[in-house]
């Protein structure tokens, strides 16, 4: 599938797969800043045109475990109509167990583009029975 991507700044890096079998395209920080809440903001310098019926999902890379960072919204969502810059915000944890931050030029996250169904919710007074029933947190064991 072809997806259009636009460099907003000259130094922006077009995302790539690190390996042929990877699900996520690596996103590289073009610049770094802090917002008014103390979050670390990574600008990619890129905008993307995701086709209708698809969405882009932004996940932290596994290397985040070496840094004092946590993606603010856990998983970012890019809707198909969004044409602005891909930006990631991380909470700065400052636990001191490794390097503090990613910097410009570092791969900071990964982008996965997936199809999604359009759902029509239908209100009802009853739901069908299931093996799990109303069992919630921890109901299937540890």
Image: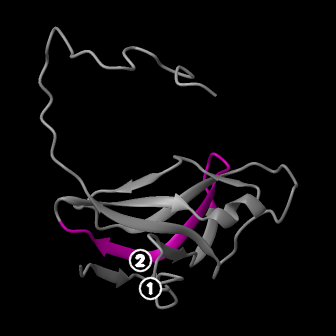
Point 70% across, 55% down: residue: 69
Q: Nearer the viewer, residue 127 or 32?
A: 127
Point 48% across, 74% down: residue: 22
Please provide percent x and percent y for residue 35.
60, 54
Please provide percent x and percent y for residue 4.
26, 81
Magenta residue check for 11: no
SS for callout 2? strand
Q: Which mark is residue 14?
A: 1
Please provide percent x and percent y for residue 11.
52, 89
Point 34% across, 82% down: residue: 6
Please provide percent x and percent y for residue 94.
81, 51
For residue 140, side relative to residue 97 (left or right): left
* Residue topped by disc 2: 46
Residue most extreme to the right: 96
Q: Which residues are magenta?
A: 34-51
Quarter of the figure with residue 121? top left
Quadrant where the image shows the C terminus:
top right
Vertical comparison of 136 with 54: above or below: above
For residue 60, side relative to residue 2 (left or right): right
Point 68% across, 49% down: residue: 38
């Amino acid at each position: 599938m072809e997806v259009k991507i636009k460099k907003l700044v000259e130094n922006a890096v077009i995302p790539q797969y690190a390996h042929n079998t990877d699900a996520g395209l690596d996103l590289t920080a073009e610049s770094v800043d802090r917002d008014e809440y103390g979050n670390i903001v990574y600008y990619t310098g890129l905008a993307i045109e995701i086709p209708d019926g698809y969405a882009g999902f932004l996940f932290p890379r596994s290397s985040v475990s070496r840094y004092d960072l946590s993606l603010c919204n856990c998983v970012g969502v890019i809707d198909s109509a969004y044409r602005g810059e891909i930006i990631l915000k991380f909470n700065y944890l400052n636990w001191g167990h490794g390097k503090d931050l990613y910097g410009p030029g570092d791969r900071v996250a990964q982008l996965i583009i997936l199809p999604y169904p359009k759902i029509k919710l239908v209100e009802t007074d009853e739901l069908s029975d299931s093996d799990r029933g109303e069992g919630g947190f921890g109901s299937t064991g540890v």
